[in-house]
Image (cartoon, rainbow, N blue to C red):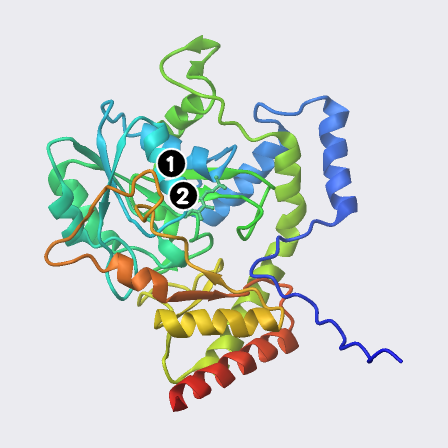
Amino acid sequence: MPAPQKPERRVITHGAPMLPDPIRLATLMQEAIAVSWFSNGGQLHQRLERALGDMAGDGALALVSSGTMALMLALRLGDLPEGSEVITSPLSFAATVQAIAWCGFRPVFADVEPATLTLCPRAVEAAITPRTAAILPVHFLGVPCDVAGLADVARRHGLWLAYDAAHAFGVTLGNQPIAAFGDASAFSLHATKVLHTGEGGFVATGGDKVLAKLRRLKNFGLEGGRMTGLGINGKLSEAQAAMGLALLPDLPAEIAARHALRTRYDAALAGLPGIRPGPGRKGASPALTTYALRMAPGLRARLHLALAEERVLARDHFPLLCGSGSPWADVPIVTADGAPIAPRVGPEVLCLPFHGRVADEDADRICMIIRRVAYEEGQA
Ligand SMILES: *Cc1c(COP(=O)(O)O)cnc(C)c1O
């Protein structure tokens, strides 16, 4: 007789996209079909833009085709001279540095702060040269940057300040929406983010004049049918907008589930030997995109294995943008003094499964594995 098979446990993925109600999605698509209008700022696009504008605070935002497009447009809004240097963080997703390079600008990396893993204003200042035209800091893992410190550096040196806010959807700082800081903020509506349109993104920026320019930039530089300058096709389609609108009614429940999951993780994982909470900033609301822990890289590797054996897929943070094998591997990380910390603190981050479909018992199982490994390590 064959040995009884161990029941296969459900895989718990690191992320899981919100799923639209199919009827709601079809009904929205039917609206586009009925008016035979599939892009170029149709009704669905306008509705989604208004809904997101309400969330972003001042309402000055434009939907675009991806988060990467949002980054490129947020930079292009600054009218930077060709070949300018743009200072950014080495800790981010590929899109941040690719957007800089795809615009023809030169990425320059400055070091991060140890507590928040976001760009250090003093390191940014040390990285400034006569060719520097902009700073592109990242609200990494949803933790807000030192927005006051960076604004001060940007103002004193006359630099454009655009934020990569792809991880910071829904985050507030001192009760202000994260989009309120800097000259422009780029958000992603990719399926791996909180609210999504499959592919998509938006740029939030201050005031109607900038918004008008943004709308020209994403539409071939056209205004009243005439080309007025550089532009691209950065538009979001009606099908994408339909996805976003179909998900909107479920967004509050998804956000509530993520807050509850964070509370559950926090309670079960506090004070474990060798494990520290992830980065954070006082006065900021918690991230909706990720739940991070920090630990020595050796423990992180063992936790990864122990979790994978139980079909739990955790994730490292992204590899250093100027790490070995990257097209920017030879670009140094500028610091205010001493050796850069980004290469050391990056490998300390472990991101746990974080989405609305992690059930309470899944979370408890994940925490039990982490507690076991942490105490085994603590005794070794
Ligand atoms: C997701 C993401 C982006 C944008 O990605 P798209 O896939 O182009 O929407 C940009 N920066 C960071 C840090 C991201 O995580």
Q: Residue at x 46, y 39 (%)?
A: 67
Element type where label 2 sits in the image: helix
Kind of residue indicated by mark 2:
Ala
In the image, residue 347 lies at what x, y percent?
Answer: 35, 63
Residue 237 picture quarter: top right
Residue 326 picture quarter: top left
Residue 219 in sight in this render: yes
**Residue position marked by numbered label 1 in the rendering:** 98
Element type where label 1 sits in the image: helix
Q: Indicate the quadrant of ligand 1 in the picture.
A: top left
Judged left or right of residue 372, residue 140 is left
In the image, residue 149 lies at what x, y percent?
Answer: 19, 53
**Residue position marked by numbered label 2 in the rendering:** 94
Could you tell me how far apart the alpha carbons at marks 1 and 2 are, in whole angstroms? Answer: 6 Å
Does residue 225 sit above or below 119 in this rendering?
above
Residue 185 in sight in this render: no
Task: Pick the residue in front: 46 or 127.
Answer: 127
Does residue 73 sit above or below 219 in this rendering?
below
Q: Residue at x 72, y 37 (%)?
A: 28
Q: Quadrant of the N terminus?
A: bottom right
Task: Pick the residue in front: 63 or 99.
Answer: 99
Q: Quadrant of the C terminus?
A: bottom left
Q: Return the residue found at the far right.
A: 1
In the image, residue 31 lies at what x, y percent?
Answer: 74, 31
Q: Residue at x 49, y 61 (%)?
A: 315
Mark 1 Cα-neighbour bin, 10 Å: few <14, some 14–19, many ≥20: some
In the image, residue 88 lies at what x, y percent?
Answer: 27, 44
Kind of residue indicated by mark 1:
Gln
Q: Are marks 1 and 2 in contact (CB under 8 Å)?
A: yes
Q: Residue at x 75, y 26 (%)?
A: 33
| Mark 2 C-beta to ligand 1 under 8 Å | no
The tally of labels here is 2
